Image: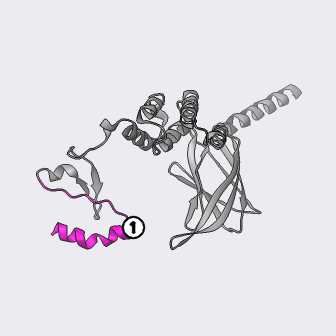
C-alpha cells in the first residue's frame, strides 16, 4: 500500500508539472498610487486582476511567445510592450500620470521583466545598443547583431518585430533589410509586420503612382460590405481619417465640395 501511495503521489506531481508548463503565470509588482484593476492584453484577450498590496497576478496559455501590454480602467499607454511565454514571469511596473495633449493618461513603465527566453534576448539587445550605438562602425555591428538574433530565433516573433522596428529607420540599407528578412521564418511572424518589412526591403511590392489599386471590401455605416470592384469605370476617392484627428475633420468641408 505504501508503494502504491508513493506511485500515485509521483504521478500527481508529474501531472501538475506537466500542466504548469503549458501555461504562464505572471506576477506583477505595481509601483504608484493607482487603485483598481490592471489589464493584460494579448492576442484578442483582455484579462483583469485587481491590484492588492501593490501586486497583480495573471495566468493563461499562449501557443508561442506573444506580444502583450498592460492597460488600466482609464485612458492608458505603455512605454513599451513585452512578450509572454508559458513560463513563470516576474515584472515590475510603475504607474504614473502623464499629460499628452489634452489628455491626462495613466502612463505604464516596465521597470523589469524576467523569467522568459525573450526577456533575455531583448535585454541583451538593449545592452548592445547602449554599449555600441556611439561607435563609428555601429551600422556594421548592428547588422551582425540582428543577423545573429534572427539566425538563432528564426521562428520567434521578436525577430520579426525587431526587424520591422529597424526597417523604419535608415540606419540599415534596403539590401541589408532584405537579407535579414530572407532569414526569417515568416509563417511564425505577425503578418502585418511582415508586410511592412517587405515594402521597405523590396520596393517592387509597394504601390506606386499609376499602379492599380489592390481590391478590398469594407463595411459602410450601415454595416454593408462595399467592394472597390463595384466602382470600375468610375472615379473613386478614398480618404483615411480618424475621429481624434482635428486636421482630418477640418478637411470635411473641402471633401464635401470635392464630392459635389
Q: Quadrant of residue 53?
A: bottom right
In the rendered view, does 109 fall on the left or right side of 102?
right
Q: Residue furthest left?
A: 233
Q: Position of residue 209 (x, y in %)?
A: 23, 47
Which region is colored magenta?
Answer: 234-260
Q: Residue at x 74, y 32 (%)?
A: 14
Query: Where is the N terminus found, in terms of image quarters?
Result: top right
Q: Position of residue 217 (x, y in %)?
A: 27, 51
Residue at disc 1, secondary structure = loop
Q: Quadrant of residue 250?
A: bottom left
Q: Residue furthest right?
A: 2
Q: Nearer the viewer, residue 242 or 131?
A: 131
In the rendered view, does 18 fall on the left or right side of 160?
right
Q: Quadrant of residue 245?
A: bottom left
Q: Residue at x 79, y 30 (%)?
A: 10
Q: Which residue is mark 1?
A: 245
Was residue 247 drawn as part of the magenta stretch in this picture? Answer: yes
Q: Residue furthest top?
A: 3
In the rendered view, does 95 fall on the left or right side of 235?
right
Amino acid at each position: 500500500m505504501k508503494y502504491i501511495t508513493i506511485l500515485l503521489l509521483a504521478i500527481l506531481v508529474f501531472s501538475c508539472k506537466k500542466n504548469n508548463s503549458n501555461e504562464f503565470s505572471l506576477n506583477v509588482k505595481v509601483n504608484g498610487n493607482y487603485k483598481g484593476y490592471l489589464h493584460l492584453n494579448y492576442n484578442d484577450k483582455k484579462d483583469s486582476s485587481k491590484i492588492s498590496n501593490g501586486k497583480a497576478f495573471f495566468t493563461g496559455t499562449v501557443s508561442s511567445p506573444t506580444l502583450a501590454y498592460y492597460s488600466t480602467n482609464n485612458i492608458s499607454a505603455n512605454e513599451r510592450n513585452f512578450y509572454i511565454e508559458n513560463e513563470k514571469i516576474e515584472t515590475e511596473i510603475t504607474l504614473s500620470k502623464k499629460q499628452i495633449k489634452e489628455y491626462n493618461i495613466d502612463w505604464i513603465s516596465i521597470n523589469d521583466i524576467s523569467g522568459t527566453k525573450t526577456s533575455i534576448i531583448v535585454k541583451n539587445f538593449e545592452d548592445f545598443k547602449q554599449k555600441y550605438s556611439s561607435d563609428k562602425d555601429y551600422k556594421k555591428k548592428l547588422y551582425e547583431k540582428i543577423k545573429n538574433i534572427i539566425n538563432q530565433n528564426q521562428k520567434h516573433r521578436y525577430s520579426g518585430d525587431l526587424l520591422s522596428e529597424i526597417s523604419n529607420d535608415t540606419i540599415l540599407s534596403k539590401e541589408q533589410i532584405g537579407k535579414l528578412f530572407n532569414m526569417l521564418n515568416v509563417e511564425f511572424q505577425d503578418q502585418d509586420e511582415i508586410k511592412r518589412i517587405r515594402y521597405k526591403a523590396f520596393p517592387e511590392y509597394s504601390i506606386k503612382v499609376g499602379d492599380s489599386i489592390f481590391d478590398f471590401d469594407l463595411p459602410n455605416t450601415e454595416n454593408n460590405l462595399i467592394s472597390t470592384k463595384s466602382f470600375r469605370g468610375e472615379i473613386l476617392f478614398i480618404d483615411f481619417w480618424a475621429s481624434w484627428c482635428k486636421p482630418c475633420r477640418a478637411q470635411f468641408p473641402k471633401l464635401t465640395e470635392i464630392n459635389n
